[in-house]
Image (cartoon, coloured by chain):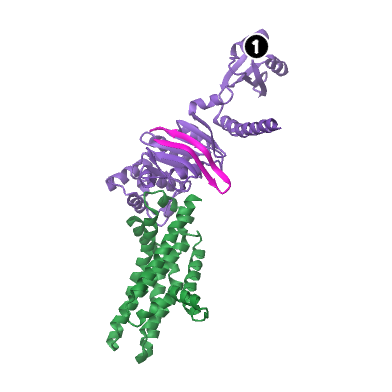
Chain colours: A purple, B green
Amino acid sequence: MIKIDHLVKHFGDKKAVNDISFTVEEGEIVGFLGPNGAGKSTTMNMLTGYLSSTSGKAEIDGIDIFESPMEAKKKIGFLPEQPPLYLDMTVQEYLDFVYDLKGCKLNRKKHIAEICDVVKITNVYKRMIKNLSKGYKQRVGIAQALIGNPKVIIFDEPTIGLDPKQIIEIRNLIRTLGKNHTVILSTHILPEAQAVCDRIIIINEGKVVANEKRENLSNLIQGNRRFEVQICGPQKEVLSELKSMQGINYVEYLGGADMDSHSFMIESQPGVDIRKTLFYLLARNNWPLINVQAMGATLEDIFISLVDKKPEQEKSKRSKKTQGGN
Amino acid sequence: MLAIFKRELRSYFSTSIGYIFVGIFLALNGAIFSYCTLQQFENSNVSLYFTLMIFAFVVILPLITMKLFSEERKLKTEQLLLTSPVSLWSMVFAKFLAAYTIFASTFLVGSCNFVVLYEYGQPSTAIIFGNIISILLVGAAFIAVGVFVSALTENQLIAAFGTMAILFLMLLLGIVGSYINFTPLRVLVNWLSIFTRFFPFTYGEFSFSAIVYYASIAFVFLFLTVRVFEKRRWE
């Protein structure tokens, strides 16, 4: 449905987007993640025809946005970071305006009523936009993106500035929309992508550093396996024995859980299942095991690992080149 | 295009700016009309009225052009327009047309004053109609300048004063021209002058070249506005 091919955007000397490529299949909800200034909004803006590219292609449903912008734009609904709302209009007037602006051919009354129902703004339909709460304004912004029933919906930071209740409501709404539309969601809030998206594309310094199904992302970081274990026994001796175990990568004391038990975080080497070895070690020492809990890598871990790793890799590549040159 | 035109037209009267413009325009129009015609008795000078109105436009017209694009940019609503299936030309022309509609309809309402002259004398209908047509064309050129300047900034005040400055310079060309000794330059300045083109209408002559000239100025500034958006998209 969406195909981005070697897209580049320069702002003067700065490379905001540096040769990124990815595809999004029909019906997918894809999270576009990255720190502030990573190039997310620039990519979104190019994808919607708001900005042109320095080089590369972006296709929506097989139509090149730069060659046939009119045709491509008909297939896109876009909610920018700040909802593009005319505050001097009522919700009804605004949605009517967007309907006309997009040259929509569907039954006006029915179509707008359906959208209002989906985004739950029917109760504020006659109210002035300037008098609405931020959450409702965001919903009206989403409603305008849905007008014309576009195949692709692009949200740029859709929950920014909302309170926790509103965030949950908007996320649920996006999940609902994902059933009938292809959705790209740009965000720097990691749990948001985790909660809503099927696939996550991580971008940093204008480059794609990861493009994986949500559940596969944790495999990207070293294949580590971490456990939190709670053991009854003398803290120092337990820690020393754990560190001496075969296949252990790292051990950290997390604190005393109660009077005579202590919690540790242990991390095994890649491909090693530490659990049996751990059991025999504790049995040999007569230290009861109270609790074992697998600690999957969080999206935060993955994100920081990927975002930090790339510049380091580049640095090491550069230094190798320099050494080679010498 | 029609959607943007309708929205823009409506927005003038959903805020106070439309009422302020119409009020100031009609008040100034009435005062200038009264001064140039009714109070001059047998020396009534219709052409002076139109000439003074052009100077009044320098101050009044920026009121309806200053917000056209600068407000959209400030409120980020231009993103909606620029990502919708509407061409840049349609968007710019729709905005221009909305401002022009307000201006032309207010001016035509103000022109009803001429009915009074027929009560007390025998004014030249040809001169009046010729002037009205030329004023409507000068207005189109001035509004196009305002549209262009409002696309350059997100600050409405800068857009208004910028437009005033350019319009004032355009009017000054006619005055400056007569002081230039270097003939080719004088000819060029007079050729570019809004006033030089306007004079035939004040004698009741219909100047086709003046119509083309004013339409060309409007076209050039609308074209430059489109180029501003294209440049921002590419830079």
Whole-percent x and y of residue B181?
A: 52, 81
**Residue sitting at x 44%, y 50%:** B79
Whole-percent x and y of residue B176?
A: 50, 78
A23 within the magenta span:
yes
Viewer-side residue, B35 vs A232: B35
* Residue A275 as seen in the image, left or right of residue A27: right
Residue positioned most to the top: A284
Q: Which residue is mark 1?
A: A282
Report the magenta stretch's main SS. strand
Q: Secondary structure at mark 1?
A: helix
Residue span colored magenta: A1-28
A22 within the magenta span:
yes
Vertical position of residue B54 compared to residue A42: above or below? below
Whole-percent x and y of residue A165?
A: 47, 40
Specify the amino acid type for callout 1: Leu
Where residue A71 sits, quadrant-wise, is top left
* Residue A139 as seen in the image, left or right of residue A302: left
* Residue A158 visible from this viewpoint: no
* Residue A57 visible from this viewpoint: yes
**Residue sitting at x 49%, y 63%:** B156
Whole-percent x and y of residue A307?
A: 59, 34
Vertical position of residue A273 compared to residue A64: above or below? above
In which quadrant of the rendered image does the C terminus of chain A lie? top right
Viewer-side residue, B215 vs A141: B215
**Label 1 crowding class (10 Å Cα cut-off): few <14, some 14-19, many 20+?**
some
**Residue sitting at x 39%, y 81%:** B49
Give the total number of marks visible in the rendering: 1
In which quadrant of the rendered image does the N terminus of chain A lie? top left
Vertical position of residue A22 compared to residue B29: above or below? above
Residue positioned most to the bottom: B42
